[in-house]
Structures are given as C-alpha cells and as structure tokens.
Image (spheres, helix red, strand yellow):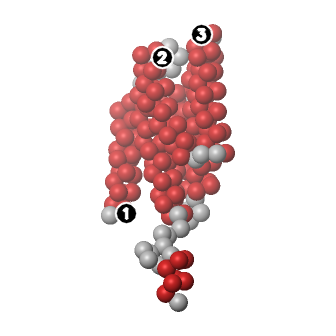
Amino acid sequence: MKFMGNVMAYIAAALLWAYAWMELVPAGFLAHLGQPAHLATLGGVIGVFALLAVASLPTSRGWMNLLVAQVLASMPLFYLWGAVQHGRLPEVLTETAGLLLFGGLAWYGWRHKPVLLGLGVVAHGLLWDSWHLHHNTVLPAWYPLACGLYDVAFGLLAVMHHCAGALRARPPEPAVGLGRHAQHSAG
C-alpha cells in the first residue's frame, strides 16, 4: 500500500510538471537561457531529475536535504534577477525580501528542521508565486503559474520523502507486556 502511495505521488507530480512544461512554458525556451524565467525552467527540469536520482539512493536523506535546501534558496533569485534587469527599485526590494525569507528558511531547515525545506518549497509556490500572478512586472506572464505548479509538486515530494525517511528511522516500539519491568517479573 505504501509503495502505491509513493507511485501515485510521483505520477501526480509528473502530471503537474508535464502540464506546466507543455502548456505554460513557451516553445523554444532553450534559445532564451539568458533570461531568468527560461533559465529557471531549465533548472526545474534538472531539479526533477536530481530529485528522482537522489531519492533512489539508499542513503539519500542528507543529499535530499541539501538538494531541497539549494532549490528553496535559489527560487527567489530568478524574480530578483528579473527585477534587477528591469531596474525597478520597489521590485528589487520586494524580491530581496523574498530572497532573505526563503534563503533563511532554507538555511534553517537544512541545519535544524529538514521537513521545513519541502514545506518551504510548497509555500513558495502557494504564496510567493501566487502573489506574483497578480503583481508580476519582471518576468513573463506564464512564469508564476508554471513555477507555482513545479514548487508544489517538488515540495510535496520532498516532504513525502522526508516523512518516509523519518518513519524508517524510528526504532520499533517494544511489544506490549515485554518491556523492561515485564521481563524482570517473568524471570
């Protein structure tokens, strides 16, 4: 049953990524890798393959945390890069605040509470990218929705991987009646 849940989660994420890729990202984006949104799209593709590769490693937990922290910390850079390219100080300040917020969350999650990494990626998609759907003046109109879908799928898979690892890492519960006191009284 657990295996089927993992398979279904990966299928759902793949469908979100496929929709974002085929319906939102313009054709020929590789010709424009000098633009922040297009480079972020390529980074997203690489991130998906890296996530799948790291998740398949037998000792993937530390590597997964590092990968997700890097993804979370780098997400705001593309909006900031767009704001700098357009030379708009209010947007640069807003995007710098996003970089500090999500970069700080990435550092804290990586150092202290790894589950926050995946949750931070989901929050970036649901909050930051959603806000940019209506306030985006620095990147192409298709980017916030594509990025938001990617973030939610990537973040949920990272949370799922973290929770599965946390469950595997727990020691088994002692059998009822076979604790330390029960063993002494039986002998």
Q: Are marks 1 and 3 in contact (CB under 8 Å)?
A: no
Q: Position of residue 163 (x, y in %)?
A: 48, 54
Can you tell which quarter of the image residue 86 is in? top right
Residue 26 visible at all: no
Q: Position of residue 96 (x, y in %)?
A: 63, 21
Q: Are marks 3 and 2 in contact (CB under 8 Å)?
A: no
Closer to the chain start, of discs 3 and 2, is 3
Residue occupied by mark 1: 3
Element on which disc 3 rests? helix
What amino acid is labelled 1 in the image?
Phe
Element on which disc 1 rests? helix
Residue sitting nearer the eye, 77 or 186: 186
Q: CA distance from mark 2 to mark 1?
A: 40 Å
Closer to the chain start, of discs 2 and 1, is 1
What amino acid is labelled 2 in the image?
Asn
Q: CA distance from mark 3 to mark 2?
A: 12 Å
Residue sitting nearer the eye, 43 or 79: 79
Residue occupied by mark 2: 136
For marks 3 and 2, give the one nearer the viewer. Answer: 3
Answer left or right for 131 relative to 112: left
Q: Position of residue 73 (x, y in %)?
A: 61, 35
Residue occupied by mark 3: 90
Closer to the chain start, of discs 1 and 3, is 1
Q: Residue at x 49, y 40 (%)?
A: 119
